[in-house]
């Protein structure tokens, strides 16, 4: 009996073993066991559990974690430098029509009978005889008394100059006893220490179309000597078409035997001690000028007038418009022992056809009348001489 049982068990073992090796392709042990369980009888299944060793599948290796990459520093892009544009060189000034010659910048360049075009000098320039300078500039120059930042030669021509901000006595000065001719035309003369333009006993002078402004405010200025816009001791001159404004002292001043003189078609505004002052001189025509706001710093007696005539003769004052000056037309006679012959008397002064408006001056009327009686002035209107509102 035992032998039969042994045989049966042995047969079952080998059958089971055969099934294991004939189930087809290799499968994981867990799947083989499951398949056997579903196809065998319960007895066989029980035997299989006892006789078959189940193999656990080797666990798959856990994937090695990818190493965290070390962040690569992102380099900031090198900024492209902003290139400043290379400034274009300042173009050379275009010479005005009719301007010839080289630029004048220093005294060492000056020669006689030369023409200069442009140039900026910062020291005094003394021109030689016969020189012409067009469109030049001078600033920051110093000089002695009765000298200019530009000192004219004899003769001399200055066209469209810019003479400004000089501690020099004057912006432009003409030579003493020069025979001329002298021409100053166009341009501007401003902010010079004592005087804009001056000249001492020079002949044949013409000043035309020049702006003369803000002169005479330097230290030590003497308005009783030479100060303001223009002062000339000139013979045979014309002062025409200029704009003279905001100067200390007097705007336009002729002195000591000046004449013959023509002062016409100028605009003369806001000069501290008067508009036009014609003093101990003779033979003048003063006409077609506009003068306003002059004389506020010296508004007493007959001073500070739009047009003042002092101890002079053979003077015609006509067709001028005078507004809001300290006085309109002021005429004075004084004993001038400093005058050379002929004796300077206030006579033959004709004032006519002017428009004069100086409000609020009636308190001065009687004094004016008495002071003006010695003058022999045919056609002189008392009201125009006093500066009352009138047309004389």
Image (tube, rainbow, N blue to C red):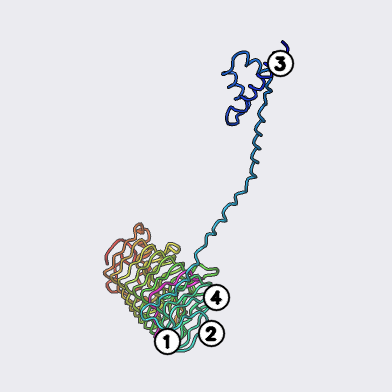
- Quadrant containing the N terminus is top right
Count of residue discs: 4
Q: Nearer the viewer, mark 4 or mark 3?
A: 3
According to the picture, the residue beneath numbered tag 4 turns out to be 142
Residue range of the region highlighted in magenta in the rendering: 179-195
Query: Is any part of residue 276 visible from this angle?
Result: yes
Query: Is any part of residue 340 visible from this angle?
Result: no
Q: Is residue 9 above or below residue 26?
A: above
**Residue at mark 1 to residue at mark 4: CA–CA distance:** 23 Å
The image shows residue 265 at horizontal and vertical percentages of 32, 72
Q: Disc number at residue 330?
A: none
Q: Residues within 10 Å of mark 1 (few under 14, many from 20)?
A: many
**Residue at mark 4 to residue at mark 3: CA–CA distance:** 147 Å
Q: Secondary structure at mark 4?
A: loop
**Residue at mark 1 to residue at mark 3: CA–CA distance:** 160 Å
Q: Residues within 10 Å of mark 2 (few under 14, many from 20)?
A: few
**Residue at mark 3 to residue at mark 2: CA–CA distance:** 146 Å
**Residue at mark 2 to residue at mark 4: CA–CA distance:** 17 Å
Q: Are marks 2 and 4 in contact (CB under 8 Å)?
A: no
- Quadrant containing the C terminus is bottom left
First in sequence: mark 1 or mark 3?
Answer: 3
According to the picture, the residue beneath numbered tag 3 turns out to be 6
Q: Is residue 83 left or right of residue 15?
A: left
Q: Disc number at residue 155?
A: 1
Q: Secondary structure at mark 3?
A: helix
According to the picture, the residue beneath numbered tag 2 turns out to be 108
Residue 370 found in image quarter: bottom left
First in sequence: mark 3 or mark 2?
Answer: 3
């Amino acid at each position: 009996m035992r032998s039969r049982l042994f045989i049966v068990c042995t047969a079952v073992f080998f059958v089971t073993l055969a099934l294991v090796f004939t189930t087809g392709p290799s499968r994981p042990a867990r799947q083989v066991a499951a398949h056997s369980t579903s196809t065998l009888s319960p007895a066989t299944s029980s035997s299989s559990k006892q006789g078959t060793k189940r193999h656990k599948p080797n666990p798959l290796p856990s994937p090695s974690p990818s190493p965290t990459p070390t962040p690569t520093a992102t380099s900031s892009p090198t900024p492209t430098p902003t290139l400043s544009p290379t400034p274009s060189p300042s173009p050379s000034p275009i010479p005005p029509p009719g301007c010839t010659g080289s630029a004048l910048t220093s005294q060492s360049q000056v020669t006689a009978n030369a023409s200069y075009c442009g140039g900026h000098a910062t020291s005094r320039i003394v021109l030689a005889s016969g020189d012409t300078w067009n469109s030049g500039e001078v600033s920051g120059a110093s000089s002695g008394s009765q000298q200019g930042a530009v000192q004219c030669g004899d003769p001399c021509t200055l066209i469209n100059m810019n003479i400004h901000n000089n501690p020099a006595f004057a912006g432009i000065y003409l030579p003493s006893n020069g025979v001329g001719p002298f021409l100053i035309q166009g341009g501007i003369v401003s902010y010079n220490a004592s005087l804009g333009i001056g000249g001492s006993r020079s002949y044949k002078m013409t000043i035309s179309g020049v702006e003369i402004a803000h002169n005479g405010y330097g230290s030590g200025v003497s308005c009783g000597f030479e100060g303001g816009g223009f002062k000339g001791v000139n013979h045979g001159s014309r002062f025409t078409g200029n704009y003279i404004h905001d100067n200390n002292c007097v705007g336009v001043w002729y002195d000591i035997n000046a004449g013959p003189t023509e002062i016409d078609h100028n605009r003369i505004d806001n000069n501290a001690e008067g508009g036009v002052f014609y003093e101990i001189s003779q033979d003048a025509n003063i006409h077609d000028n506009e003068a306003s706001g002059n004389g506020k710093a010296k508004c007493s007696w007959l001073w500070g007038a739009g047009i003042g005539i002092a101890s002079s003769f053979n003077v015609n004052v006509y067709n001028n418009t005078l507004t809001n000056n300290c006085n309109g037309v002021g005429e004075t006679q004084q004993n001038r022992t400093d005058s050379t012959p002929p004796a300077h008397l206030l006579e033959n002064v004709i004032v006519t056809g002017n428009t004069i408006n100086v409000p609020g001056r009636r308190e001065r009327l009687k004094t004016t009348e008495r002071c003006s009686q010695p003058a022999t002035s045919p056609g002189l209107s008392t009201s125009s001489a006093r500066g009352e509102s009138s047309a004389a």
